[in-house]
Image (spheres, rainbow, N blue to C red):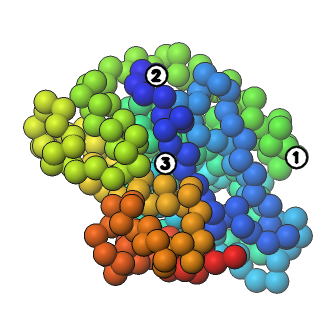
């Protein structure tokens, strides 16, 4: 895949999943090195013991597209597109999910699917790409560990990547890289002057990202704040929302709640 080294510029975080309790385990494993500009990780979310009630799986906005399936029911595989807000999925008291998290631009390039057709949607994978849906349905079962699953996924995606010829307008990548390098704190009108019209730039972002450059910048800015993990004291005293591009505290709190599902003070409390 051509383009910037995305992984060095962007590390999407899912803190609400990472902080799950003792009875729920979450792991991330990096894919083969040759895939790391397209796929951020393979992930596993499972119960160690049955829970007393349903588990609320909250996913914060991260700019990514994910494939996911239950290991004991691999025929039921799905894809979730870019989300412009947090999402909550109620899961049964016992579960074992596997997933593939694609970095921004990765899924559309590998599968030639317009990302905006998946934005804020949860779809059956077979309706989007029957080949990988069949691969997942026939190659995995509940007896397999993540260590056994990872090389099979690597093999599939390495073969797929070698067959893909993706020529992307370099001016799109220029704008995309500017957003990542500035942590989303960039003027869309002035800072992304790459020589193409705003209409054409929006069309490219909708295809490769799933929404406008403005929406993607908002998510990148939010993710940078999660990466920084500021204390609630720093948030109040140092007014960090100015540093990451929010014009006032009310705007910052409102946007954060939309993307995370709770207030910054609750999200970053010890």
Residue at 63% x, 63% y: name it.
Answer: 15
Dot 1, how many residues are within 10 Å of its Cα: few (below 14), some (14-19), or many (20+)?
Answer: few
Query: Image point 71% across, 47% down: which residue?
Result: 28
Rendering coords of residue 248 (x, y %): 31, 75
Verify CB contact (< 8 Å) between mark 1 and mark 3. Answer: no
Helix, strand or loop for disc 1: loop
Comparing labels 1 and 3, the label whose residue is closer to the camera: 3
Q: CA distance from mark 3 to mark 2?
A: 17 Å
- Asked if the residue under mark 2 is in contact with the one under mark 3, i.e. CB atoms within 8 Å, the reply is no
The residue carrying pointer 3 sits among few (fewer than 14), some (14 to 19) or many (20 or more) residues within 10 Å by Cα, namely many
**Quarter-wise, where is residue 55 in the image?**
bottom right
Q: Which residue is mark 3?
A: 65
- The answer to whether residue 52 is left or right of residue 190 is right
Furthest residue to the front?
Answer: 237
**Which residue is found at the position 48% from the left and 49% from the top?**
64
Q: Which of the pair 55/204 is nearer the observer?
A: 204
Look at the image and tell me in which quarter the C terminus lies: bottom right
> Helix, strand, or loop for circle 2?
loop
Say whether residue 150 is visible: yes
Residue 262's place in the image compared with 244, above or below, is below
Of the numbered discs in the image, which one, if any, rests on residue 1?
2
């Amino acid at each position: 895949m051509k383009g910037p080294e995305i992984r060095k510029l962007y590390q999407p975080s899912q803190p609400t999943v990472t902080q799950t309790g003792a009875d729920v385990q979450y792991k991330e494993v990096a894919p083969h090195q040759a895939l790391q500009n397209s796929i951020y990780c393979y992930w596993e979310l499972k119960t160690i013991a049955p829970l007393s009630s349903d588990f609320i799986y909250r996913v914060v906005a991260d700019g990514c597209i994910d494939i996911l399936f239950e290991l004991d029911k691999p025929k039921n595989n799905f894809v979730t597109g870019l989300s412009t807000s947090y999402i909550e999925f109620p899961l049964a008291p016992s579960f074992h999910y596997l997933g593939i998290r694609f970095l921004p631009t990765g899924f559309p390039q590998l599968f030639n699917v317009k990302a905006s057709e998946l934005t804020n949607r949860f779809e059956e994978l077979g309706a989007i790409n029957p080949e990988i849906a069949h691969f997942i349905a026939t190659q995995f079962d509940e007896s397999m560990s993540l260590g056994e699953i990872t090389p099979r996924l690597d093999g599939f995606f390495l073969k797929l990547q070698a067959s893909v010829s993706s020529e992307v307008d370099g001016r799109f990548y220029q704008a995309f890289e500017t957003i990542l390098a500035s942590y989303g704190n960039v003027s869309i009108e002035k800072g992304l002057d790459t020589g193409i019209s705003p209409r054409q730039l929006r069309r490219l972002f909708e295809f490769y990202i799933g929404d406008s450059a403005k929406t993607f910048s908002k998510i990148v800015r939010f993710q940078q704040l999660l990466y920084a993990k500021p204390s609630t004291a720093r948030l109040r005293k140092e007014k960090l929302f100015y540093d990451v591009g929010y014009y006032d505290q009310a705007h910052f709190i409102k946007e954060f709640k939309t993307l995370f599902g709770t207030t910054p003070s609750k999200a970053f409390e010890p």
